[in-house]
Amino acid sequence: MEQKYVLNNCKSFRLRDVFECGQCFRWNKQLDGSYTGIFGKNVLNVTEEKDDNGYKITFCGICDGDIEQICNFYFDLERNYEKIKQDLSKIDNNLKEAIEYGSGIRILNQDLWEMIISFIISANNNIPRIKGIIDRMSKKYGQEINFRGERFYTFPTSKELSKATEKDLRELGAGFRDKYIFETTKMINNGEINLEELQKEKETNVIRNKLLTLCGVGPKVADCILLFSSLKRFDVFPIDVWVRRVINDLYIHNEVEAKVDKKQIENLAKEKFGDLEGIAQQYLFFYRRERD
């Protein structure tokens, strides 16, 4: 049965900002401007419309539980993003401008297992291809959910994905990542990494070091998993070509961008943005990529 949940006067939730900022791969824009996506065993359609003091956000869909509780957790609705934006905007005008551009960003609480595989797939890849691989993988190994006359497929569990051979994964378009996905799935199923224990771990570096033992997980992928999953660590700063570019343009000013050292960026981010560096990264990344 379809459920509905409405947020009124929301100032820190814009569909474009949330779903197009690079943190998720299973949400798609519809012809009417809304977005439909699947996460866990939930399929939602999300719409926005201007109201007196912000935006009215409406969630409609099939949920594995109460829609309000599910949305509050997944969309991080209980966190005060207005306060975060105010604090970060005081740092400098560069970040203030980036925040104004992407003022509706919220960092989603996404499934840890799904984020591990999704960001392994993201390595040296573009978003349309990432989405295609994940969709084909889900269609073959996930569970079907029908919503408004369309078929959606859950992201396969580690046990479901263990049915796939390297060849199977290659045929889905995973390319050189087939081995990484296969080996990491095996490691999770063998208990070499316990995801429930990772969720309970308090030290970010302890989690990062364990993630780095997974096949296909390097520093940038590990930081994306830390930031965009339900681990919810804001004290990380994933660095890709867009982040290197915006940090160099706004703060470092090296004539040869390629010479900007990763450690230099990490130190600058920690010094300027502190424990909110992960959120600052998203504002800066989105601002630069969308306006380039």
Image (tube, grey):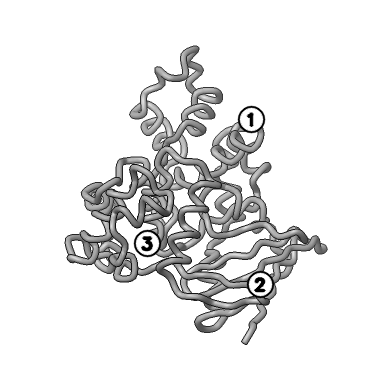
| Residue 281 drawn above or below residue 267 | below
Task: Say the numbered circle drawn on residue 59.
Answer: 2
The kind of secondary structure element at disc 1 is loop
Residue at 39%, 52% in the rendered image: 171
Q: Residue furthest top?
A: 255
The kind of secondary structure element at disc 3 is helix
| Residue 184 drawn above or below residue 90 | below
How far apart are the alpha carbons under marks 2 and 3?
Answer: 23 Å
Tell me the crowding category of disc 3: few under 14, some 14 to 19, or many 20 or more residues within 10 angstroms, Cα based.
many
How far apart are the alpha carbons under marks 1 and 2?
Answer: 31 Å
How far apart are the alpha carbons under marks 3 and 1?
Answer: 31 Å
Residue at 37%, 62% in the rendered image: 112
Residue at 71%, 62% in the rendered image: 34
Q: Return the residue at label 1.
A: 292
| Residue 45 drawn above or below residue 30 | below
Marks 1 and 2 in Cβ contact (< 8 Å) = no
Amino acid type of disc 1? Answer: Asp
The kind of secondary structure element at disc 2 is strand
Amino acid type of disc 2? Answer: Phe
